[in-house]
Image (spheres, rainbow, N blue to C red):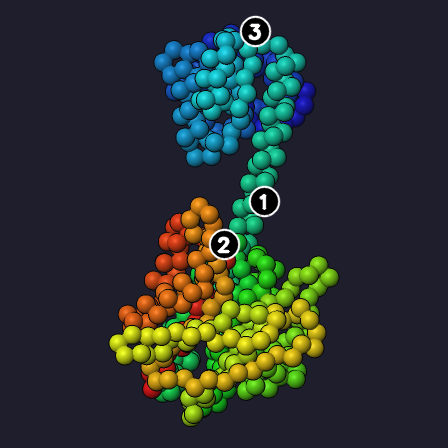
């Protein structure tokens, strides 16, 4: 007799049928748990977590069809293979068995080779599905832990280490970060290089998952330590060039990232910036009782795609009362409607203008809007926004 850790729940009101089936199943080597009614079978199913259920279709009280439906409604009940044992051979009864949630069926009188063959097959299928579910759960846990790790490294609005300096400079910084269910590669940061120069940046590593997230963290740490060889952190184009020297794409075409980097001079209100294939920043400027927006972009391709690329640098004066928004493409590349058109950058800029009019420091309504446009489901990419408000 084979040995197995699997447990089979046998539900049949007829004692002789149960003993006959149990004798046939001895060759499979599984532990057998018996129930003489649908009600008892439902109870034992919840207590024993069987690997397979053999279920008689015709029983007094709760019949096999009703019992099958109720099992499928139990926690994890949808995953248990159910082999319906029935003396009914008409097509309507077979259809009813499958409609009730049966995985397969055998007809009475049961032949041992057929029964043991079906049982072995269903047990193997159940074990394979169980391993896939467990693997997926481990992967989801890994993603959650990676997301928590990334989020812990990113600055937040309540970062006391930086907020005091920002208040002194009449600058307020707000952030909103929501990792996707697949975990993208977004990261952002800001810091004072000296009393008069504020640095801020946002990057987006290609792809999803732990690999992209860890690469974004690696880049973030390099920038924080300011040990990037060849980079003058006051000159955005040199930072992009130095990063491009260090991070070239792998043989499989991965590991590149987009990047937006800016330096704000509080003395002359001048913003110097450079971009590497990243979405343009949006500058919202006062216009009477309203705000107008413009895109801040520069010529450049993603970091890592082409060595020795000459990155462009640009400058702009920031009007009093303006706000600058850095973000990744995940905030606006959201399918809309059945034709899957993209919500788009212009619509996102309009949402930022409307947000600015509220004078709120809370950016969560922006992510709520994106989720709503996405049908209330999690976004396919990270939602990352960095808002820098220049009050004077």
Question: In the orientation shown, which residue stands out farthest toward the bottom?
Answer: 267
Residue 154 locus on image (x, y percent): 48, 70
Residue 95 coordinates in the image, percent (x, y): 48, 17
Provide residue 9's location: percent of width, then percent of height: 51, 22
In the image, residue 171 sits, relative to residue 207, either above or below, namely below
Query: Can you tell which mark lies on residue 380?
Result: 2
* Tag 3 residue: 109
Q: Quadrant of the N terminus?
A: top right
Q: Secondary structure at mark 2?
A: loop
SS category of the residue bearing label 1? helix
In 3D space, how far apart are the residues under numbered discs 2 and 1 (Cα atoms)?
Answer: 21 Å
Q: Which residue is mark 1?
A: 135
Q: Which of the two labelled residues, at mark 2 and mark 1, occupies the earlier sequence position?
A: 1
| Quadrant into which the C terminus falls | bottom left
Marks 3/2: CA–CA distance: 52 Å
| Front-most of residues 274 and 10 | 274
Residues tagged 2 and 1 counted as in contact (Cβ below 8 A): no
Nearer to us: label 2 or label 1: 2
């Amino acid at each position: 007799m084979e040995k197995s850790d699997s447990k089979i729940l046998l539900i049949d009101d007829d004692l002789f049928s149960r003993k006959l089936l149990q004798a046939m199943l001895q060759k499979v080597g599984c532990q057998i748990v018996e129930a003489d009614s649908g009600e008892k079978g439902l109870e034992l199913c919840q207590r024993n977590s069987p690997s397979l259920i053999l279920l008689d279709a015709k029983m007094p009280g709760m019949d096999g069809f009703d019992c099958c439906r109720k099992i499928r409604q139990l926690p994890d009940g949808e995953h248990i293979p159910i082999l319906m044992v029935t003396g009914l051979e008409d097509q309507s009864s077979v259809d009813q068995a499958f409609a009730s949630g049966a995985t397969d069926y055998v007809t009475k009188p049961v032949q041992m080779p057929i029964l043991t063959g079906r049982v072995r097959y269903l047990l193997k299928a159940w074990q394979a599905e169980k391993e896939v579910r467990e693997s997926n759960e481990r992967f989801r846990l890994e993603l959650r832990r990676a997301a928590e790790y990334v989020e812990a490294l990113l600055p937040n609005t309540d970062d006391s280490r930086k907020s005091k300096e920002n208040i002194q400079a009449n600058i307020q910084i707000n952030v909103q970060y929501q990792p996707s269910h697949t975990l993208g590669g977004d990261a952002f940061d800001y810091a004072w290089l000296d009393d008069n120069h504020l640095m801020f940046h946002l990057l987006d590593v290609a792809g999803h998952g732990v690999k992209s997230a860890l690469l974004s963290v690696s880049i973030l740490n390099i920038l924080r330590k300011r040990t990037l060889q060849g980079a003058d952190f006051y000159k955005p184009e040199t930072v992009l060039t130095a990063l491009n020297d260090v991070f070239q794409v792998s043989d499989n075409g991965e590991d590149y990232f987009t990047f937006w980097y800016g330096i704000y001079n509080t003395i002359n209100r001048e913003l110097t910036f450079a971009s590497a294939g990243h979405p343009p920043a949006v500058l919202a400027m006062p216009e009477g009782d309203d705000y107008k927006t413009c895109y801040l972009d520069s010529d450049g391709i993603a970091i890592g795609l082409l060595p020795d690329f000459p990155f462009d640098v640009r400058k702009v004066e920031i009007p009093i009362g303006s706000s600058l928004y850095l973000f990744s493409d995940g905030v606006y590349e959201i399918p809309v409607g059945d034709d899957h058109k993209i919500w788009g950058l212009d619509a996102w800029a309009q949402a930022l203008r409307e947000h600015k009019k509220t004078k709120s420091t809370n950016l969560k309504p922006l992510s709520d809007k994106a989720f709503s446009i996405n049908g209330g489901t999690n976004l396919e990419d990270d939602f990352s926004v960095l808002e820098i408000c220049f009050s004077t």
